[in-house]
Image: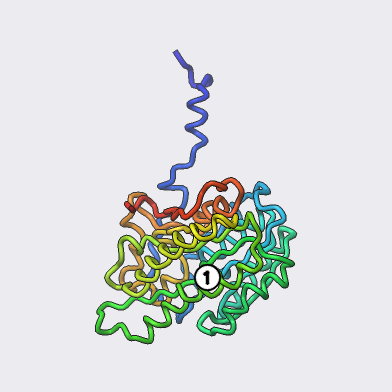
């Protein structure tokens, strides 16, 4: 008979485990609106990028990474995690996101790593074509590329979805990915890693996100095809497919305003994810631990069924 003061190792393990349902709060965001692109500094509630929780173990020591959309949301969480794993990090972001970017740049520097700011607009061909070269110049090389920046605007009816919005969404989400990756290849050595951010929307498109979902499906195809092309060169290409993650994208017309209070409640875990919960997936795909992982789309979506 086991007394309370003589617990088994199994009991101790159970006591130490985190319940994924309750590890992060089930948020019910108030209806709110920000002009595109949105700022984490004004997000209610604020997103968790791992500032106080992510602990590195040196898995990316000496690596040099470029992350697009690295000022907030998933990109910011990845930037912090990479720095705590030992990497120097350049982040690309819109000039309007400077307030958020400065916070993340300070977090990178706090880990004793080099932080490079690369503000600009991916709609501008000259900027996106030069981005990888500038990152490599300032970092002294480049061996990780995270294509993460995205544009998402919800439109209820196809009749109201303009050609201009479709063009801009494709330019930012997928055409810029082609351009940045193409330019980065002259810098990426054997052992380098490219990680693209796709979405559960590629498999289960929301009727209000037709253009966005279409780009995410294209990113999956781009990832898998490029992975086969670059594998013989020793460069691995993979993707991460987030589910509903709480970021400024959602309040800058990324979701219908009336749906914000229940955002993410429809997944099996019953809550939206936090950006920090994506960071370990990117660290894994960037590190040598995933050396035999090629063309994978790693789903981090709270339990949504995917192919």
Tell me residue 130's x, y (percent).
Answer: 62, 79
Q: Nearer the viewer, residue 266 or 295?
A: 295
Q: Judge whether 37 appears above or below 61 on screen.
A: below
Say which residue appears at 51% left-offset and 63% top-offset. 74
> Is residue 107 at least partly visible in the picture?
no
Q: Is residue 216 left or right of residue 258?
A: right
Residue 101, picture quadrant: bottom right
Among the 4 quarters of the image, the one containing residue 158: bottom left
Q: Residue furthest top?
A: 1
Residue drawn at (38%, 83%) of the image: 165
* In the displayed structure image, the side of residue 167 where residue 148 appears, left or right: right
Question: Which residue is disc 1 drawn over?
Answer: 40
| Whole-percent x, y for residue 129 in the image | 58, 79
Q: Nearer the viewer, residue 266 or 169?
A: 169
In the shown orientation, is residue 109 left or right of residue 52? right
Front residue of 305/128: it is 128
Q: Nearer the viewer, residue 34 or 69?
A: 69
Instruction: Measuring from the top left, give residue 182's x and y in whole percent.
Output: 56, 71
Q: Quadrant of residue 94?
A: bottom right
Q: Residue 64, image x and y in percent?
A: 68, 62
Helix, strand or loop at label 1? It is helix
Residue 59 in sight from this viewpoint: yes
Vertical placement of residue 258 versus 164, above or below: above
On screen, residue 17 above or below 269: above
Point out the image quarter for the N terminus: top left
Q: Residue at x 39, y 73 (%)?
A: 254
Horizontally, residue 257 falls left or right of residue 87, namely left
């Amino acid at each position: 008979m086991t007394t309370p003061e003589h617990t088994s190792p199994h009991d101790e393990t159970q006591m130490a485990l985190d319940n994924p349902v309750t590890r992060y709060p089930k948020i019910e965001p108030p209806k709110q609106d920000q002009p595109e692109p949105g700022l984490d500094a004004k997000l209610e509630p604020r997103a968790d990028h791992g500032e106080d929780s992510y602990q590195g173990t040196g898995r990316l020591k000496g690596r040099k990474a470029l992350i697009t959309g690295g000022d907030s949301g998933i990109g910011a969480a990845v930037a912090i995690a990479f720095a705590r794993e030992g990497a120097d990090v350049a982040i690309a972001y819109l000039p309007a996101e400077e307030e958020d970017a400065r916070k993340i740049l300070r977090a990178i520097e706090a880990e004793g790593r080099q932080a490079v700011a690369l503000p600009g607009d991916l709609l501008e061909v000259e900027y996106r074509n030069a981005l990888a070269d500038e990152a490599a110049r300032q970092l002294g090389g480049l061996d990780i590329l995270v294509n993460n920046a995205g544009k998402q605007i919800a439109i209820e009816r196809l009749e109201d979805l303009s050609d201009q919005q479709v063009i801009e969404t494709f330019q930012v989400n997928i055409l810029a990915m082609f351009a940045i990756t193409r330019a980065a290849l002259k810098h990426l050595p054997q052992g380098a890693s490219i990680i693209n951010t796709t979405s559960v929307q590629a498999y289960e498109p929301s009727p209000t996100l037709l253009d966005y979902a279409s780009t995410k499906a294209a990113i999956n195809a781009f990832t898998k095809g490029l992975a086969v092309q670059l594998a013989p060169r020793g460069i691995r290409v993979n993707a991460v497919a987030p589910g509903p993650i709480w970021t400024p994208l959602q309040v800058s017309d990324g979701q219908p305003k009336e749906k914000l209070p229940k955002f993410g409640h429809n997944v099996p875990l019953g809550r939206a994810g936090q950006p920090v919960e994506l960071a370990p997936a990117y660290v894994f795909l960037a590190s040598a631990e995933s050396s035999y992982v090629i063309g994978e789309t790693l789903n981090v979506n709270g339990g949504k069924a995917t192919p």
